[in-house]
Structure formats: structure tokens, C-alpha cells
Amino acid sequence: MFRKIKSYMPDVFIVAIVAMILLAYIFPGIGGEHSPIKLKIVSRYAIMLLFFFYGLRLSPEKLKNDLKNWRLHFTIQLLTFLFFPVVVLLFFPFFSGGEYFTLWLAVFFLSVLPSTVSSSVVMVSIARGNIGGAIFNASISGIIGIVITPLWMGFFLTNAQAGFDFTSTLVDLVVQILLPVILGLIFHRFWGEWAIRNKRWFALFDKSVILMIVYNSFSESFINGVFASIPAYTLLVLSAAVIVLFFVVYAFSTYFSCKAGFTREEQITVIFCGSKKSLVHGSVFASVLFAGLATGGLFLVPIMIYHAFQLFYISIVARRMSKELR
């Protein structure tokens, strides 16, 4: 009886995510620019440490084999940068030139963003998927997005600004993600077994990093009044559209990865990485593409809704998959 009741109780991690959003709404600005401890800086180093720990738990030999799996990588990037935007493009004729065109464009902006890095790898790890493939695809997605995202948006933004700083962005990705993983791989021969034995504690650290990112992202949004500028009805319809978009991509990713003959680990990686979108990249890209636009803040709303929902749903699925193998 107790087990049956427990199965219907909300996941602790989901409750924690909701708590972070509520905390950001009630007490925004904790760890902000004027705080002695800035969450942005802490998050940056926490993410680096997170990927160092991933590197420790990865076998270099296994990673080499994962990187050779071009079918896996090609499938995930096609889902991220082609299937996703094509789904949204199907609705372009209904919104072109209308009063809700900006809302459609905001959803399209979401669809052409790179996959999120940290949460994708964390969820794949929880579900016991192909972690090496997840790290590779989530990392390369951010680099590909530097070119693909503005190219897609350029078809619809006549006044979009160019000028992404390729060098600084690439350096930032290397420093935060690739370099820590490489260092972890180097030290795998010394501390690898210890890291694998203590993977439960590392999973707790991973989730803590995600909670910090969720609070910081929503805190900045509430401070800037992004949600206050949108009528409740419009926000409700937009939220529904974004959630439907998630399930369309998630369902197609699940179906295609199964039909393509991927292993269970590979299917998890395709589904989780192929259906994710990055709030971090969305914020950075929006500041350049929509600089000076009065409705610039609106373009962040779909990705914030999507980001929150993908964490909620995927975390439930990831934990369920993990329990199936116990």
C-alpha cells in the first residue's frame, strides 16, 4: 500500500525545481550583481566541476567508440536544427503578417536554438544512457548553433544584427565543457574507480547545479518583468503551444530512434538530447538578435517555459528508466 501511494507522489527533484521558481518569484536577486557571492560565477565553476566529474567516470576507450557513432550524432543534430524548426514552420502561413506573428517568431526562435548541455547530460546519466554521446552532442550543438541559429532567424528578421563573437564563444565552450571533460579523462586512470563508486553523490551534485541554474534564470526574468508584460490568456496559449511542441518532438524522437535500430542507451541519448533546448544559449543569442527591439523580452518567454517543462518531464522519465534497470 505504501509503495503504491509513494509511486503517485511527486519526485523530490521536481518539487525542488518548483521551489526554485517560487523562490525566484518571491525573493529574486539572490546572488545577483550586488551580492557578495554571485550565482553566475558560482554556476560557471560548478558547471566546469560537473563536467570534470563526468570525465572522471568516463572510460577513454568507451568514449572513443562513442565518438565514432556518427549515426547517433547525425540524428541528434538533425532533430535539433532541422526537424524542430520544420514543425514550427508548418504554422507560418497562419501567422504571417498577423498580430500574433511576433509570438510565432518567438516560438520559432526556440525551435532553432542549440540543445542544452548540463541538463541533457545529467538526465542521460540518470537514465543510464550513452553519456559520452550526450556530452559530445550537447557540446557540439552549442558550437553549431552559433552559425545555424542566426541563419534560420535571418529568414524572418530583416533588421537582425550580425556580429556574434565566434572566438570568445568558442573559448567559453571549450573552457566550461570540453577542457574539464578532457582533464577528467586524463585523471580517470587515477580516480575513475573512486568516482564510479561514489556516483550517487555526484548525481546529487549534478541536480544541485541544475537547481542553481533554474533559480538564477528565473530570478533575472522576474526582475526584468518579462512575464508582467504578457497578458495571462496569451501566456496560457503560448505555454500550451510550447508544451505541445515538446511532445511532438519527443514522440518523433522516440519513434525514430526505435525504428533506426539504436541500442537502449543510444535511444535515451537521442530522445533526451534531441528534444532539449538551451535557455543559456537562448538568452545570449536573444541579446544580439533582438537588441533594440521593444518586444525583445518576449522572445525569452517560450524558451523559459520550454526549459522548465523539459526539466520537469524528462527528470520523471529519466528516474523511471533508471528504476527499470535496478
Image (spheres, rainbow, N blue to C red):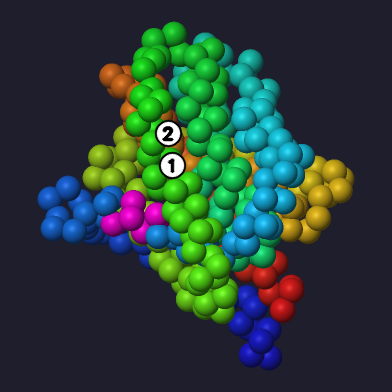
Q: Is residue 44 left or right of residue 150?
A: left
- Alpha-carbon span between mark 2 and mark 1: 6 Å
Q: Residue at x 36, y 24 (%)?
A: 165
Tell me the kind of residue under disc 2. Leu
Q: Which residue is mark 1?
A: 174
Residue 155 visible? The answer is yes
Q: Are marks 2 and 1 in contact (CB under 8 Å)?
A: yes
Tell me the kind of residue under disc 1. Val
Q: Position of residue 135 (x, y in %)?
A: 57, 50
Q: Which mark is residue 136?
A: none
Q: Which residues are magenta?
A: 42-48
Q: Residue at x 38, y 27 (%)?
A: 167
Any magenta on residue 204? no
Q: Nearer the viewer, residue 119 or 220?
A: 119
Vertical placement of 111 versus 68: above or below? above
Circle 2 crowding by C-alpha within 10 Å: few under 14, some 14–19, many from 20: few
Instruction: Residue at the far bottom: name it.
Output: 1
Q: Residue at x 56, y 79 (%)?
A: 197
Dot 2 falls on a residue whose secondary structure is helix
Q: Is residue 208 left or right of residue 40?
A: right
Dot 1 falls on a residue whose secondary structure is helix
Q: Which residue is mark 2?
A: 170
Q: Position of residue 78 (x, y in %)?
A: 69, 32
Pick the quarter of the image with the N terminus. bottom right
